[in-house]
């Protein structure tokens, strides 16, 4: 799986970071850094929560072959 951030939608609320701190970091200025674009399957639950609770729906999980 791969996570994609729509930078046009992201407003830096930091919900993703609170749900998945190993995958996302948000600066004090609200700039999102994606720490792991292709996280391990063991991180799926926290990634799904980050996607679900993103207030601007800026995150998407893309399934790739072999996932």
Image (spheres, helix red, strand yellow):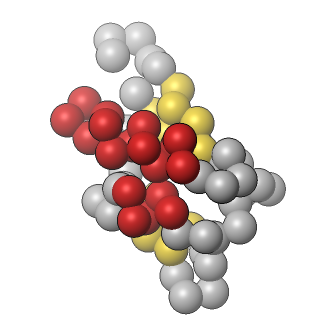
Quarter the C terminus occupies: top left
The spot of residue 51 in percent (x, y) is 52, 43
Q: In the rendered image, is residue 8 in sight?
A: yes
Which residue is painted at 79% across and 56% down in the image?
8
Where residue 32 appears, x then y in whole percent?
56, 68
Asked which quadrant contains residue 43, the reply is: top left
Say how many tags the image has: 0
Percent x, y of residue 57:
68, 46
Q: Residue furthest bottom?
A: 28
* Relative vertical location of residue 61 with respect to residue 36 in this rendering, above or below: above
Q: Is residue 24 above or below residue 44?
A: below
Residue 24 vs 67, above or below: the answer is: below
Q: Is residue 25 above or below residue 36?
A: below
Q: Quick one: which residue is furthest to the right in this view?
A: 8
Asked if residue 33 can be seen in this view, the reply is no
| Residue at the image position 53 percent from the left and 41 percent from the top | 52
Task: Please give left or right for residue 20 compared with residue 15 in the image.
Answer: left
Left or right of 38? Residue 50 is: right
Taking the view exactly as shown, the residue that stands out farthest to the top is 65
Residue located at (58% from left, 36% from top): 60
Q: Residue at x 47, y 20 (%)?
A: 63
The spot of residue 1 in percent (x, y) is 40, 27
């Amino acid at each position: 799986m791969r996570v994609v951030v729509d930078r046009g939608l992201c407003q830096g609320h930091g919900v993703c970071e609170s749900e998945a701190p190993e995958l996302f970091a948000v600066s004090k200025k609200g700039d999102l850094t994606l720490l792991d674009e292709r996280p391990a399957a063991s991180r799926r639950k926290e990634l799904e929560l980050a996607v679900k609770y993103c207030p601007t729906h800026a995150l998407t999980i893309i399934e790739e072959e072999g996932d």
